[in-house]
Image (cartoon, rainbow, N blue to C red):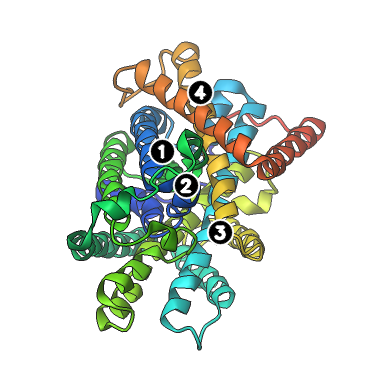
Amino acid sequence: MNATQPTLKKALTTVHLWSIAVGLVISGEYFGWNYGWGVAGTVGMLIATLIVTVLYLTFVFSFTELTTSIPNAGGPFTYAYKAFGPVGGLIAGYATLVEFLFATPAIAYALGSYIHFLYPEQTDVLTVAVLNYFIFTGINLLGIKESAVFTLVITLLAIVELLIYIGIVAPHFQFHHFMHESMPFGFQGVFAALPFAIWFYLAIEGVAMVAEETKDPQKTIPKGYILGILTLVILALGVMVVTGGITDWRKLATIDYPLPESIGIVLGKDSSWTKLFASIGLFGLVASFHSIIMGYSRQIFSLSREGYLPAFLSNVHPRFQTPHWALIVGGLVGILALYSGKTNELIILSALGAVVMYVVSMMSLFVLRQKEPALERPFRAPFYPYFPLIALLLSAICLVAMVYYNVVLSVVFFAGLFVLIVLFLIFKKSTPIN
C-alpha cells in the first residue's frame, strides 16, 4: 500500500473493538443456531458447539497475531497475500466476502421475522428486511466513530437482554425436555450441525477489518478480541442450554425467532412481557447487522484498493471518511440474496466462506512465521504451534463436513471461486502490498 492510496480515519479504542467483536456475532445467539437442532438434536448440537468453541478460542488467539502484526482493512486478504501472493489473497478475500455478504441477508430476514412476530398483520418480512439495509447502510455512511458508538450502545443492550432471557427461562428448564431424542441422527448429526454451531461465533474476525481505523492497534486489538470471544462463549452456551429444556425442542428447530417464541411458551404469547422481549430482541440482530455491514464494506474497500475489484469501490467519502461505494454495492448484493428466502442456506454459505478463510489464515500464520521472522509481532499466538494447528485442523474438519452435507451449496461456492481465479489469471494486475 503506498502513500497515495485512500486511507481510513483512526478512531477506535479497546471498548469499541470489544463491542464490535460481540456486536458482529451476537445475533447468532438470537437465531440460526436452532437449525442445528433439526439435524442433530440438543445433545448433538451441544457437542458440535463445544467443538466449534475450541476452534474459535484457538483461532482468535492465533488470528490476533496476524491482526496486530498487519493492521490493514483487508484483514485475511492481506495476510494471505503476504503469505501466498495474489492468488492466495484472492481466495481469502473471496471467502471473507461470501461470509459477510451472506450473513447480513440472513440477519435481515430474521429482523423481518421478529417484527412480523410482533405485528403480523401490519408488516411483511421481506419489506422490513430490505428497509433495514437502507437504514443501517445509511448509519454506516456517517463515520466509523459514530458507527462504533452506535454499536457499543446496541451491543450492551443486546447483552443485557440475553442475560434477562436466561434469567426468565432457566427456572422453567426441565432435563427430560433437553434429553428427549437428544441425538436422533447420532454422530452424523454432530457433523451436519457444525455450520449452525459456527453461527454462534461467525464474523468475530471482522474486527481485523477495522484494524486500520484503530488507535494503538497493537495493544487495543488483543484486548478487544479476547474479551469479545469470552463474552460470546458464556452467552452462546447459556442461551442454547436453557432454551433446549423448556419444551419439545423440535418446535423451535425451524423458525427464525426461537427466543421470543420460547418466552411465549414460558410466559404466554399474550403476555406483555413476551411482546416487550420480542421488541428489545431486535437489539442483538441490529448489533450484528450493523457491525457486519461495517466489516464487509472494509473488505470490499481493501480488495478494490489493491486492484481486485473496480477502483471506484475504494473511494472514501470526502466528509465522513467512509468507503461509501463499498457500503452501497455490498448492500445491493445483500438485498438480492434476500430473495432466496432460505435463512438456513444463507447461514451455510456464510459458514463455508468462514471456514475457508480460517484455513487460509492459519496457513498464512505458519508461512509468515517462516517467511518474515523479523516482522514485528506485538501479540504472539500462545502455545504456538499448537493453538493455530488445532484451529487449522478443526476448520478443515468443519469444511469437509459442510461440503459432505451440503453438496449443491458447496458446488456454488467453489464454482464462484474457480471463475474468479480464472478471470484473475487472465486479467491479473500486480499490486504488491507492503
Circle 2 packing at 10 Å, graded few (<14), some (14-19), many (20+), is: many
Q: Residue placed at 50% from the left, 36% from the top?
A: 191
Give the number of the disc on residue 29: none
Q: CA distance from mark 4 to mark 1?
A: 26 Å
Say which label, 4 or 1, has the lower sequence index. Answer: 1
Quadrant position of residue 414: top right
Q: Position of residue 156 (x, y in %)?
A: 25, 61
Say what secondary structure mark 2 lies in. Answer: helix
Say which label, 3 or 1, has the lower sequence index. Answer: 1
Label 1: which residue? 48
Label 4: which residue? 364
Depth check, front residue: 142 or 251: 251
Tell me the mark number nearer the camera, choosing from 4 and 2: 2
Label 3: which residue? 343
Q: CA distance from mark 2 to mark 1?
A: 9 Å
Give the number of the disc on residue 196: 2
Decide if residue 149 is on the left or right side of residue 340.
left
Marks 4,2: beta carbons within 8 A:
no
Q: Amino acid at mark 1?
A: Ala
